[in-house]
Image (cartoon, rainbow, N blue to C red):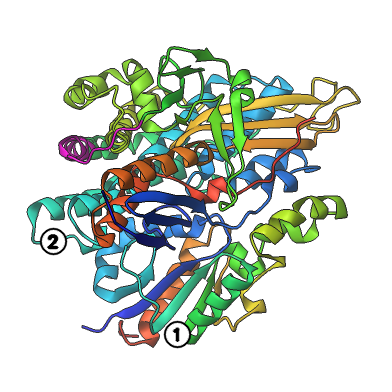
Amino acid sequence: MHTTNLDLSLTEITKIEGTATLDLKIREGTVTECNFGITEMKRFFTTAISGKPILAVPQLVARICGTCSNAHLLCSIKSIENGLGLIPSPQTMLLRKLLNFGLIIRDHGLHLYVFVLPDLFNRDSILAFDENNPVEHELLHDCFNVKEVGNKLGIITGGRSVHAPFATLGGFIKIPTKEELQALIPELKTIRPRVLHLIDVFWKCQFKQDINVKFLALTDKNYSFLDGVVKTSDGETVSQEQFGERLKRRIIPYSQATGYFFGEALHMVGALARINLNQESLHPKTKQAAEKALAVFPSQNIYHNNLAQAIEMLHAVDSSIDLINEYQAEPEKPQALRHPGGGQNGLPRGGENTTGIGLIEAPRGTLFHKMEITSDGKIKQGKIIVPTGQNQIGIEHAIREYVTNNIDQPKEILSHEIEKLIRAYDPCMSCATHFLKVRWK
Amino acid sequence: MKKLRVGWFTFTCCEDSTILLTELFNRHWQEWLKEIEFVHAKVLQSHNEMRDMDVAFVEGAIASYEQAAKLKQIRALSQKLVAIGACACISLPSSQRNTFDAAAKSEIAPFLLQFHQNEKVQTLSEIVTVDDTVQGCPMNEQAFLNVLNKYLKEFEIKSP
């Protein structure tokens, strides 16, 4: 019989986006308390957007999160455009995909190189990698070279890689020249082998913990992150409209963020879910180059979320090269906004309120925005459900399971392994604490 | 070789300036590794210390008594304190709840109570002395580089 008693409090989990804590209590060899709390202060964005003109809302909700900013921007635009019945032009969609691929390269790059790689090499930080060690030297340089190309892709298409100012309802207020984007192709080709190397590093990584959850992801035939239907790992297909209805809130008293179940099921969203459910839709060159790594999927090992992210970075590189080659830079202004009730430019004449849903795959998983738009072009109320909110309960379950199976490990090892496990989910605490529950009427 | 002892801290915000910092590393990491010692930077490293700093860069607004107490501790430990980004400088958008109407304020009141948030979200300068500001949402990159270079010279890490 175990006799272990332990109290463990991780007050500032490092190398994640935002602030989270863990309180763990073990009594006589049993985990009696395992509270994973997100302690970012609530900022009440869904209350703040009420009454705001629709044109202002995408840029405001982008401020929910610094790193997922452009995902919120694109999802908000999609929800409002869907509400208005606005269909973006093919060129606008191409630029939005490029903006998002820039985010995938930059954001997955930050997570894998800066947050996770130090765990693989027993270093405190990527900045502590040894320049005299050839492997560490190479990864240290790759880190900044790869991230920078994603950063540039965001800047050229969106005006900035964080809170991109050019993306708006109906299109882009400024579009890049063909030459500006073409100049990125050699850089994308340069980082491609480096991303392949990163895939290899995570393919060889032996970290393992299986999670028993339902995987969910928005899937389409181009692995676009921006469209499709939700698929689940038990074979169900869920429409974008149904998705929000199926998520069930769970109040977590010690966390500033709300947790979710999908129906009654514990679920997981993110790169692991996407690759598990839709790897056949990856870019053909990605599938060919990453064949060995892709054979690992479907996987229940949460640490394969890191490998899945690395593969998605390669897909973003390969897809971006194609999209840039397609891009013609046709002069184009954002489309005028027309409310189904009548008028233009967000100032419609009378009519009923309309509701729009936006669903996209943000870097960390499925992101849901639902906006009710008044007939005078303002938001009546909004609902936003973020990936980390959906994964929060699963993270706590995984920690509890890990500790239960490693109950005799010393406190230092438990702390380190728990932080590693949390990082594998790539949680984003800023996103998770933006809102107040909406009583949807 | 002497390095500038820097802390990077985040309070209530979206951490957009932290993300920009990690992107600025793409172009500056080799020089910064020689010039800067990160005493505290939770986004970059696991081992962080609350000890004397030459410069503390602080992102985010202050939303609770605990955050205000930590900010005062940072102020006491740092020779210079720089407010980074809109939330730290003008408290928005994190302070948008300060101007909610009565109905919205009443709706959020239980959450403020439950998580010990203050009635109003504040800028850094409402609580401590701020030596410099880098405005913007996210911070203006060039303005940040200018402030950093100013202190690299002032603390004699770089020659003037």
Question: In the rendered structure, the residue with mark 2 lies on which chain?
Answer: A
How many numbered callouts? 2
Q: Which residue is mark 1?
A: B77
Question: In the rendered structure, the residue with mark 1 lies on which chain?
Answer: B
Provide the residue span drawn in magenta: A193-211
Decide whether the magenta segment is chiefly helix, strand or loop.
helix
| Helix, strand or loop for disc 1 | helix
| Helix, strand or loop for disc 2 | loop
Q: Is A346 contained in the magenta span?
A: no
Locate residue A222: give its quadrant: top left
Report the residue at 49% width, 48% height from top.
A160
- The kind of residue tagged 2 is Glu
Residue situated in front as seen by the camera: A97 or B71: B71
Give the residue furthest to the right: A350
A185 sits left or right of A37 in the view: left
Quarter occupied by the N terminus of chain B: bottom left
A237 sits left or right of A307 in the view: right
Residue B155 rendering spot, x and y as whole percentages = 36, 87
Locate residue B154: give its quadrant: bottom left
Q: Which residue is mark 2?
A: A131
- The kind of residue tagged 1 is Leu
Residue A22 in sight:
yes
Residue situated in front as seen by the camera: A52 or A261: A261
> How far is disc 1 from disc 2 in space, using C-alphas?
32 Å
Residue situated in front as seen by the camera: A98 or A413: A413
Residue A332 in sight:
no
Are there few (<14), some (14-19), or many (20+) residues within 10 Å of tag 1?
some
Report the residue at 29% width, 26% height from top.
A299
Residue situated in front as seen by the camera: A396 or A220: A396
